[in-house]
Amino acid sequence: MKTTGIAVIGAGPAGIAAALAAAEAGASITVIDENSAVGGQLRWRIAPLRGLDEALDGLPACRAAETLRERLATAGVSVLAGTVAWGLFEDGSLAVAAPGGGFRLRAEKIVVATGAVDLVLPFSGWTLPGVMTARAAQVMLHLHRVLPGRRVAVIGEGRDAAELVTDLETAGAEVVLRAADPAQVVASGEGRVEQVSVNGEQREANAVVIALGRQPDPELALQAQVDLGYSARLGCHLPLRNELLETSRPGLYVAGEAAGAVDLAESFAEGRLAGLAAAGASPERITTAQEKLARARSPERSADADRLRPWASDRAQTETDASSPWTSWVRAATAEGRDNSLDRVALCRCEQVTIGEVRQAIEEGALTINDIKRRTRAGMGLCQGIFCTRAMALLLHAERGIPLSEIVPMTERPPARPIPLASLVEIEE
Amino acid sequence: MDEARSIGTGDLRVLHHPVLGDLPVSRPVQITVDGQPLLAREGEVIAATLLAHGILVCRAMPRGREPRGVFCALGRCTDCLMTVDDEPNVRACLTPVREGQVIWTQAGLGGWEGPAG
Ligand SMILES: Cc1cc2nc3c(=O)[nH]c(=O)nc-3n(C[C@H](O)[C@H](O)[C@H](O)COP(=O)(O)OP(=O)(O)OC[C@H]3O[C@@H](n4cnc5c(N)ncnc54)[C@H](O)[C@@H]3O)c2cc1C
């Protein structure tokens, strides 16, 4: 068993800020990130940064990631790259899979800064090769310099979709169609995307990029069974935190997009506060960090943070649910009879379980995500439900009228990643 | 080998980029995918080489041999599992190319049944 003062999981903006702040306060720190280099989402984005600090603003995101890496080196913080924390156990120790083998890590304090993953919803043809997430498209375009296709359709209408369209066009691809919501999209072709239609308007295309935004990925904190609250804005449950960003489990902090932060500035400010708090910094420093975080938060987000309450006591969400951006997807997915082209579409990509099979399970009495999982195997696959539980929750909500706020996430168990058996064996020792 | 190939290798390469600049020259790495030799760029992941050459399929699923390709590029979705140097279930989106690597499209959960599609 290795030991450290503070373990920071994730070296995106939030984790970096946490590590820099904790180093300032004199703590011993271990930073773990499964990517090959630090920077989190910044590594594969090229849009110019706004709202961090003078040295970073205006730089393409990927260059800023390099600057942040230098700051970590200057502060003497070492980062274990290519290393995954896949379990957080009862005794507070972390299970880690590293290139050289696995190990157990005991930390006095843990900062979970694991960020977010792409939000996806099933549509006709979404399992065809050529359909990919915004992140996959950006990784291919900017880290590997490969076009996802020459003619690309983009799904989504928010900030991420706008950035994707710019990224694709800048690199020389043609954006041939855009769709606001996945239920309007049909991708088709022989073994790969060849055509895409949006509300009946058809184009030849060789790729479809899903850019619906991101969803928080606090999986390690869920494994630790911290208290959760429902965020109406994000439509999902998040760890509840006190004013120091500490969860119901003492010594376990969550910061950045993993906890629902909306942007870079907020993620960075949260990371700093969590790092200082975990390191036991002086009250003055903590107050300054709290004030900075309050300034970094948009009014919309501040309101959201105030609404985080334990799910069981929150019954007033139904109205918000009805006007959620997913309403039209839910309507299409639960339409009766021939109108419904989604019934045969895979909801769970890993186990190839269709939307129809999940609806059937709900009709036959499934009332929770764990119920659906047991009856259909949906969510049992290698992705650990990260790409299908949202759709399951929406179906439960639509078919049973259960408020989204009452649909608790799947029970999370280690491992958080499909890790090689060898890592498990070494852990045993 | 001509100069362009040692830079790019593959039709879908972005050779010139307004923000990132020209694609740096890299040492070409030769890999074999379903028996077909392909040139890759040193340091990239297998999935990038495939995509650059217009190859989209990484595996066929257990049910209906449904083809899958890179979806999340994060190591999470496992749609890009391939058999690499006899080892099944290797994630093409995370695994770097190496000279002489032998890669096969994977059928189902790892049993090798010949190239899919
Ligand atoms: C397309 C797009 C457009 C955006 N536009 C803007 C914008 O205009 N303005 C703005 O302010 N922000 C924007 N953002 C968001 C911004 O990039 C994020 O807010 C920021 O990166 C979040 O930082 P984070 O540290 O919380 O998470 P991330 O950057 O996601 O970092 C999380 C890190 O944790 C690691 N990790 C996760 N799980 C584990 C584990 N179990 N073990 C080890 N490591 C793990 C991951 O590898 C990753 O490196 C955009 C993002 C995208 C994708």
Image (cartoon, coloured by chain):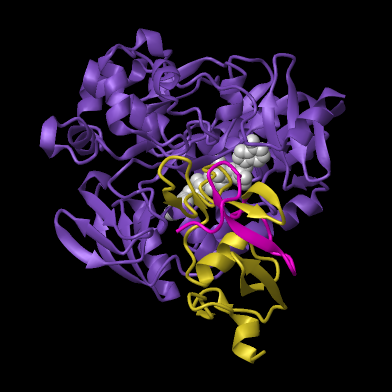
Task: Check if residue A81 falls in the magenta segment.
Answer: no
Q: Left or right: where does residue B116 sit relative to residue A335? A: right
Q: Is residue B3 above or below residue A83?
A: below
Residue A250 x, y percent position in the rendering: 67, 15
* Residue occupying image coordinates x 64% and y 72%: B40
Quarter of the image that includes the N terminus of chain A: top right
Most prominent secondary structure in the magenta stretch? loop
Residue extending farthest to the front is B113
- Boundaries of the magenta span: B91-117
Q: Is residue A117 above or below residue A191?
A: above
What shade does chain A have? Answer: purple
Q: Is residue A362 above or below residue A324?
A: above
Dividing the picture into quadrants, the one containing residue B78 is: top right
Instruction: Indicate the chain coloured yellow by its letter.
Output: B
Dividing the picture into quadrants, the one containing residue A119 is: top left
Q: Is residue A27 above or below residue B90?
A: above
Closer to us: A290 or A198? A198
Quarter of the image that includes the C terminus of chain A: top right
Residue A340 x, y percent position in the rendering: 17, 37
* Residue occupying image coordinates x 31% and y 27%: A357
Task: Check if residue B99 falls in the magenta segment.
Answer: yes
* Residue occupying image coordinates x 53% and y 44%: B108
Closer to us: A60 or A423? A423
Is residue A16 visible in this depiction of the protein?
Answer: yes
